[in-house]
Image: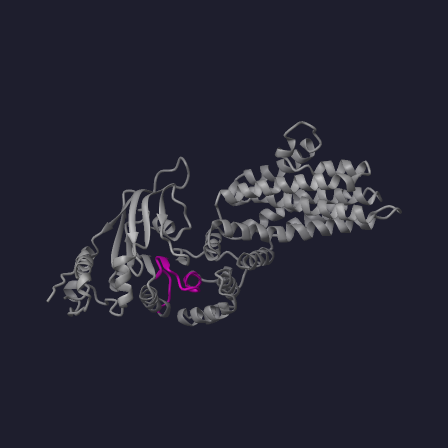
Amino acid sequence: MRIGGLARFRLRAAVSAGALVAPVVALVAVQLIGLSGGDGPAALQMVTAACLAFPVLAWAVRQVLDAEPDDQALLSALAVGGSVRGTTSGLLAAAGLAVPAALACVWASLLRVDEQGVSAADLLAGSGVAVAAAAAATAVGAVAARAVAGTGAMPVVVLVAAPVLVAVLGLADAPGVGLLVPRLAEAVRAAYDGRLAEAAPAVIGQVLLWSCAVLALRLALRRP
Amino acid sequence: MPAAPGGAPREHRSPLCVRALQQDVGVELSGVAVRYGRRSPWVLQDVTLSLPSGALVEVTGRNGAGKSSLLRVLAGVLRPAAGRVSGRPRVVGWAPERFPPAQRALAGDYLLAMARARGLGDRAALAVGREAERLGLGDLLGVPLAELSKGSAQKIGLAQALLAPPGLLVLDEPWSGLDAGARDAVPDIVKEITYQGGAVAVADHQQQVAALAPDLRWHAEDRRAVAADVAARAPASEAVGPRSTVEVDVPAGQVDDVLRLLRGRGLSPRTR
């Protein structure tokens, strides 16, 4: 309850500070460009939208987390009872932005589906992939935030390297790849092959587990 | 026995508080060391101090001696690189030396959010109103934090530390930048917290805290922070200030404890 209230305040503060204007513009632009190729199967449209949203949402997450000055983050953490709870409130604020934004992108992509429309199973799977992409974006954004990556070039490196690695390693079959990157690209391949509904649970599970592991490591750092 | 040295002894300290000073170890710092990076120089090393509940400690030392770092460790907003801190109360108020106002949120909304974050729920608005009245924040509540002057931001920083009654209040240069009304409120705040059994730590270059007759003094110097003789900074005020005699009625079994406590603060108690 206390953490949720602080999360809402932090998200409102980031919005009112204008920290999200650039990521939102970028998100709309990426979606318009990425889905401008014409009508396609609904499943493919949805997971493409989710994957395109992932790096921009990671940037937006970082913006939310970094909107609060360091000492104010310390004060917030003190108010809610410690650095872990303070960090959790920031991550909740970020996820509160990323999840609805990812779902909006995925559902908006359905405006361009082909004449076959969308099945309930694909809609559910596509929405699940959107939530998973938002979780992965929250994890990457948390690592790129000032408290972890500092203020130099490292945040940019993290934000650029993450989607590149997701694209390059995401389709590799080598053992252990699932530990390194969220396999969002696997959802695109499954959608292209027309088997998103069957593949989605495994993909979503892997992405959520990867995200939770990264976020747990972030919390273990105990830096507000 | 003589009164505490200094012009304004905290005459209203409760018997409960005196008992707390004797029995409650409060916050303990054991072997604490601080540095801001693995290759950075040590700011503090091997600091072992204790702050009993209900006590007021003045933290002294020159600029850069590590006072703010020590206060941050005490408040729990800075993890020591070595050592440990125990006995920190659940509710800690910390007013940093410079409250960071770089946010668009209205000051009133910020305080309300902090009050709710402290779990005050429906009482949050009441707590904000109380501190607004005490520190003269009325006109500031509708102003964005980013537009506050330094002194006004300091008031907000002080107010957020007081929204929930703290078991430990840590004030880093609390008088800096405050207007006369708010400056006058600080001693009352310190008295209120210690009277309620909370501990207060104050770093203050302007030496106004000396007038509050602190129970303890911690001095930071050369990467060390040690408990210094609190009476050592008293002579000036002692020489010019009025003196009075206070009689204390204590159970026979506690006489030695009370005498030891008072002698530890540079006083000269007598029994009869």
Q: In the image as oriented, which residue stretches furthest toward the right? A: A115
Using the rendered view, name the quadrant where residue B201 is placed: bottom left
**Left or right of B121, for residue B99:** left
Q: Position of residue B240 (x, y in %)?
A: 16, 66
Looking at this view, is A122 or A164 the one in front?
A122
Looking at this view, is B33 or A31 the one in front?
B33
Looking at this view, is B98 or B35 the one in front?
B35
Say if A94 sits above or below B242 in the image.
above
Q: Which residues are magenta?
A: B154-180
| Magenta-drawn stretch contains B174 | yes
**Left or right of B171, for residue A148:** right
Residue located 31% across and 49% down the image = B63
Looking at the rendered structure, the number of numbered marks drawn on it comes to: 0
| Magenta-drawn stretch contains B179 | yes
Q: Position of residue B272 (x, y in %)?
A: 10, 67
Which quadrant is home to the N terminus of chain A?
bottom right
**Visible residue check, residue A67:** no
Q: Position of residue A181 (x, y in %)?
A: 64, 35
Q: How is the image coloured?
A: one colour
Say if A9 sits above or below A140 in the image.
below
Residue located 76% across and 51% down the image = A107
Q: Position of residue B118 (x, y in %)?
A: 48, 61
Say if B27 sits above or below A219 in the image.
below
**Visible residue check, residue B216:** yes
Using the rendered view, name the quadrant where residue A16 is placed: bottom right
